[in-house]
Image (cartoon, grey):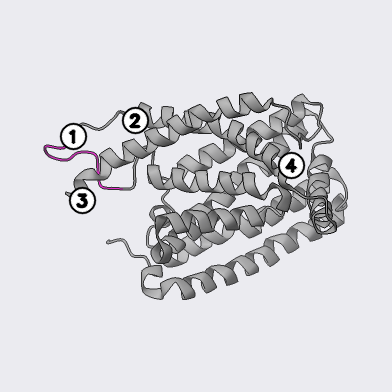
Amino acid sequence: MSYTDKTLEWGNARSAMTLFFITVASLIFFGGIGLTFVNATYGIASPEGMRWFQFSVSLGLFLMPPLIFAQIVASNPSRFLNLVFLPSYGSATHSRKNAEKLPPASHTYAALALACIGAFFAIDLLAQFNQYIVPDTEYFQGLKDQEALVTDSLKTLLQDTSLIALLANAVVMVLVPAFGEEFFFRGVLQKLFQRSIGVRGAVLASAACFALAHQQPLSFIPLLFMGILLGYTKYWTGSLWAPILLHSINNGFALLSSYAAGGELQTESTMALGWSMVGIVPLVIGILWLRNIRRKHTAWMHQ
């Protein structure tokens, strides 16, 4: 059976509307179930209640809609979402007659590791920059209050430092967001954007949606950077598993850092500016390496 993708026939407008209605219905269904369950058991203000409610909202808003959408529009949902084994580079098979020998798979993983390590430093540097550029005005104070609500919710989830709570938070704050947000923003949105505004526009547009969805306006610049890096990582490797892996590691590092600090959420940088700048070196090396690997792999297609 040949592969079919209905979004190619529907166009972006119909595809976007279909995704929108699926997302609304999914959020109402799973969010409603979660809210009913929480109110009947723990209470919405308790850490357990907040954890279950966040899980149900993440499930309904990010994880299920792209899975349902891919199931509807494609004969092979995994292929539609680019859930292909690393390294893939988004092109034809490796074996080609008289082709240049490609770098081994270990090079791809090494480049991803460097990009991931460097991203920690870059995010820290951008967070420091964010603090300097925010003016002390009434409008930005309102944004700070809005972001404080999100921060307070996260702090509530981190109050319990037991092993059971750590495992539960790993699911709610690491795995579900990493899989759900990557399925939604890089798996579906970036693919749809790319057909109308190209790779660069699609990466930027999906990254902006990713940053806005976090409801942390004063952290918009670091979130936008992370979205761009995840978007290009998916494009360079051709596999959604690459940004899922990087996203999981980033969220997991933040979670473990908070537990190492006794359950305190790390909202401000504790790294010296010089170290943050030096740490960008592995990021640049990793990015250039990934780009070069993909270029070598796909060069023959344009000859």
Given the image, on which type of amino acid does mark 1 rest?
A: Glu
Q: Amino acid at mark 2?
A: Ala
Is residue 15 toward the left or the right of residue 26 in the image? left
Of pointers 2 and 3, the one earlier in the residue sequence: 2
Q: Nearer the viewer, mark 2 or mark 3?
A: 3
Q: Earlier in the sequence, mark 4 or mark 3?
A: 4
Task: Please identify, in this view, whether the residue under mark 4 or under mark 3 is nearer the observer.
Answer: 4
In the rendered image of this protein, does residue 43 appear above or below residue 155? below
**If you read the primary sequence from the N terminus, does the residue marked by circle 4 or circle 1 appear first?**
1
Residue at the farthest left position: 98
Residue 2 image-quadrant placement:
bottom left
* Mark 2 vs mark 1: in front: 1
Distance from Cα at disc 4 to Cα at disc 1: 48 Å
Q: Residues within 10 Å of mark 1 (few under 14, many from 20)?
A: few
State whether residue 63 is above or below residue 72. Answer: above
> What numbered label is drawn on residue 131?
4
Q: Are marks 4 and 3 in contact (CB under 8 Å)?
A: no
Tell me the amino acid under the disc marked 4.
Gln
Q: Callout 3 environment at 10 Å: few (<14), some (14 to 19), or many (20+)?
A: few
Q: What kind of element bears circle 3?
A: helix
At which x and y percent is residue 38?
A: 82, 54
Q: Rounded to the nearest whole Å, what is the CA distance between mark 2 and mark 3?
A: 23 Å
Q: Is residue 216 visible?
A: no
Q: Is residue 94 magenta?
A: yes
Which residue is under mark 1?
100
- Find disc 2 in the rendering and name its residue: 105
Between 283 and 48, the one nearer to me in the picture: 283
CB within 8 Å, label 2 to label 3: no
Disc 4 to disc 1: CB gap under 8 Å: no
Estimate the spatial distance between the alpha carbons at disc 4 and disc 3, rounded to whole Å.
Answer: 45 Å
**Which residue matches tag 3?**
302
